[in-house]
């Protein structure tokens, strides 16, 4: 799972580190990465992940706990009373937690307003011959800064 999460975010990270000509691709990759991480939160993806882990563990003679057994932490804190099954523990505290954190970081850094702004700025890039030019997006951007643009400018 970590390999998949890091794989999606690595591609995005590399693209965002490129020069301006790759800005539009990077912004599209943000949406793709968010979608892939959200898709991984589905029950089918957890089942696929568990199958991959079980196969790996069997191949390397590693004991796999039954997901129906009660979870027993290796180092029990004092007063540990929580009784949940292994499946619940791994789904909520490990699998979902990692994906939620990765999604939260992307959402914190790239909310919809930031993406719209970056797309508008990217449409002014000479290197791409103004390929992603979108007049409506630029007008929205200008409207967001009323002190900088008069009504006649718009």
Image (cartoon, grey):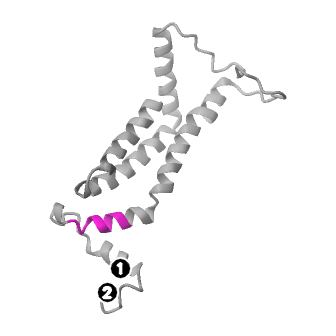
Q: How far across and how far down the image is residue 21, in percent?
A: 22, 57
Q: How far across and how far down the image is residue 137, in percent?
A: 32, 72
**Who's the residue at 44% across and 57% down the image?**
110
Give the mark nearest the N terminus, 1 or 2.
1
**Who's the residue at 50% across and 13% down the image?**
57
| Contact? badges 1 and 2 (CB < 8 Å) | yes
Q: What is the spatial separation of the Cα atoms under label 1 and label 2, in whole angstroms? A: 7 Å
Part of the protein shown in magenta: 117-125
Q: How far across and how far down the image is residue 5, in percent?
A: 44, 36
Q: The residue tagged with tag 2: helix, strand or loop? A: loop
**Who's the residue at 46% across and 21% down the image?**
52
Q: Is 25 placed above or below 123 here? A: above
Q: For the image shown, how many numbered marks are present on the structure?
A: 2
**Who's the residue at 25% across and 58% down the image?**
20
125 with respect to 109 (left or right): left
Q: Nearest the camera: 23 or 45?
A: 23
Q: Is 17 placed above or below 55 here? A: below
Q: Nearest the camera: 110 or 51?
A: 110
Residue topped by disc 2: 154
Q: The residue tagged with tag 1: helix, strand or loop? A: helix
Residue topped by disc 1: 142
Q: Is 16 placed above or below 67 here? A: below
Please check the rendered image and state whether residue 123 is part of the magenta-colored stretch, yes or no.
Answer: yes
- Quadrant occupied by the C terminus: bottom left
């Amino acid at each position: 799972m970590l390999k998949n999460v890091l794989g999606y975010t690595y591609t995005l990270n590399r693209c965002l580190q490129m020069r301006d000509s790759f800005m539009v691709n990077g912004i599209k990759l943000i949406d793709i990465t968010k979608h892939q991480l959200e898709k991984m939160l589905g029950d089918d993806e957890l089942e696929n992940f568990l199958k991959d882990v079980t196969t790996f563990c069997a191949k390397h003679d590693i004991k796999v706990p039954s997901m129906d057994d009660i979870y027993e932490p290796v180092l029990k804190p004092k007063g540990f009373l929580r009784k949940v099954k292994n499946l619940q523990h791994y789904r909520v505290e490990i699998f979902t937690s990692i994906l939620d954190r990765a999604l939260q970081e992307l959402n914190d850094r790239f909310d919809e307003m930031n993406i719209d702004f970056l797309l508008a700025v990217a449409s002014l890039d000479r290197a791409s011959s103004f390929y992603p030019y979108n007049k409506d997006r630029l007008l929205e951007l200008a409207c967001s800064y009323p002190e900088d643009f008069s009504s006649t400018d718009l």
